[in-house]
Image (cartoon, helix red, strand yellow):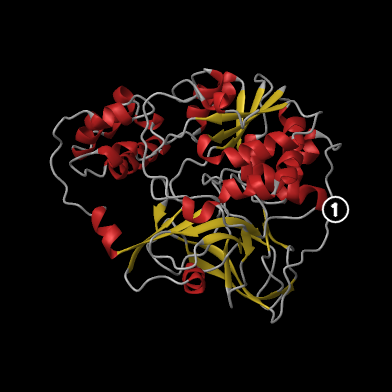
Amino acid sequence: MLASGLRLLGLKSFRHGIHPPEAKDETSGLAIRQFPFAPLLVVPLQQHLGKPSLPIVREGERVVRGQRIARPDGMMSVSMHAPASGTVRRVALAPAISGRMVPAVYLEPQPGSTQEVAEGAPCTVEASADEIVAAIQDAGVVGLGGAAFPTHVKLKVPEDKHVDTLIINGAECEPYLTTDHRVMLEQREDVFTGIRYLLKVSGAERVILAVEANKTDAAEHLEKGLPTDLPADVEVLRVKYPQGAEKMLIRALLGREVPSGGLPLDVHALCVNVATSAEIGRLLPHGRGIQERVVTVTGPAVKNKGNYRIPIGTPLRFLLDHVGVSADVTRVFLGGPMMGAAASSLDISLTKGISGVVAFGETEAERTHSRIHPCIRCGYCVDACPMFLDPSQLGALARNEEHDRMAAEYHLMDCFECGCCTYVCPSHIPLVQHFRVAKAAVRKAQAH
């Protein structure tokens, strides 16, 4: 059993990586709480990789909580649903995390609106694989670990590929975040139900639920409740960042190497975030769509830290006002401090891909604004990179805008922007930011 100390010896992991402070203790023991409705909810119609959803409601229209308010625009798109019952005030542009303006539905909740959601047309596990995939798209399910990739697209396994192992990713290696931890403890049956749908669609022969060793209570809880007819095992992994990255999990659990430029399907694996599995298991049996998600709200500047089930479209300003922040709050990360994005405005809204809101005060922010010095060729970044790239050389090429060479000779596009190199750099060079700019330039050149 997992409780045995022997089970924790020789834990699986991957080479390289880092060990930043976990900073999870303040919220890991806090149960999920329901968050109130903001006076105005702004639901962006591009909360996923791919084309924005198309609005199907008009200004002045009354909607009920859970009602579909936008339909998919093609394969790489998903539905959007009303996070509250109320009145559509506007269908217009709104600021997004990226800094761009995107289409959005402005919804004013009716006074006294309840948190209840009406039942829809259920999709059972007995449905065909195609019917389940369509139901997942209609439910608006995307990767809830942060990537926000449309889940129905991920589940469409090409005819020339096959999946033998489904990995349910409960590693949650990002500092501060405890969303997945609480979901595993509080929504165990939803996770298992979601796995049944995922097995039906993917055709996988077995399931591994991957959990880091700092969440052994969740691992034991999952293992204790595993249905006997589910071909699943719980694996406890060594605590290391970025253990939760797909390629790292596959390497640690299966000993398989996803090829450069390849996908997990190339090595017969499929990775799905544990919260995504839970949402599939929570929504599909009732024919519902995503109107809310669990978010860890924490950080040194937050007064009432916790794990909250927050309506999609909740403005960041309202969220922070409700939990309370210190007067010196300076930086707010959407996601975690390693791979999340720093909020450029408090006018942006919570989207499906945001698993955490982490606020820092002036003291903590000063530590991340150290003066940048020239590279000293120490090699720390090379030792830290889990993809075995050369961030130092890539950084030098980025400064000279040699983007094509970065991609062709130094495998720039294999970087998944985990931030390990930036974290360990004694010269405080913002390497990841350089790589993001370079990758955008490469994609733009390829598009032309």
Determine the residue positioned at 65% across, 36% down.
Answer: 220
Q: Quadrant of the rendered structure where residue 56 is?
A: bottom right
Taking the image as shown, residue 267 lies to the left or right of residue 115, namely left
Asked if 284 appears above or below 41 in the picture, the reply is above
**Number of on-image labels:** 1
Given residues 61 and 194, the one toward you in this image is 194
The correct choice, above or below, for 3 with respect to 112 in the image is: above
Residue 420 placed where, x, y %? 34, 37
**Residue drawn at (81%, 28%) of the image:** 229
Quadrant of the frame with the N terminus: top right
Where residue 369 appears, as percent x and y from the top left, is 23, 54
Could you tell me which residue is drawn at 51 percent across and 64 percent down? 349
Q: Position of residue 287 (x, y in %)?
A: 80, 53
SS under mark 1? loop
Q: Give the residue type that dot 1 points to.
A: Ala
Of residues 434 and 428, which is closer to you in this image?
428
Q: Is residue 432 above or below residue 348?
A: above
Examine the rendering and report whether any part of residue 227 can be seen: yes
**Could one spot residue 273 in this view of the protein?**
no
Left/right placement of residue 177 relative to residue 38 reads left
Q: Where is residue 315 in the image (x, y as percent from the top left)?
A: 51, 69
Badge 1 crowding class, 10 Å Cα cut-off, few under 14, some 14 to 19, many 20 or more, is few
Viewer-closest of 252 and 397: 252
Q: Quadrant of the C terminus?
A: top left
Q: In this view, does 202 lie to the left or right of 36?
A: right
Q: Which residue is nearer to you in this view: 71 or 339? A: 339
Q: Which residue lies furthest to the front in this view?
A: 5
Residue lying at the far bottom in this picture: please name it.
111
Q: What residue is disc 1 on? A: 121
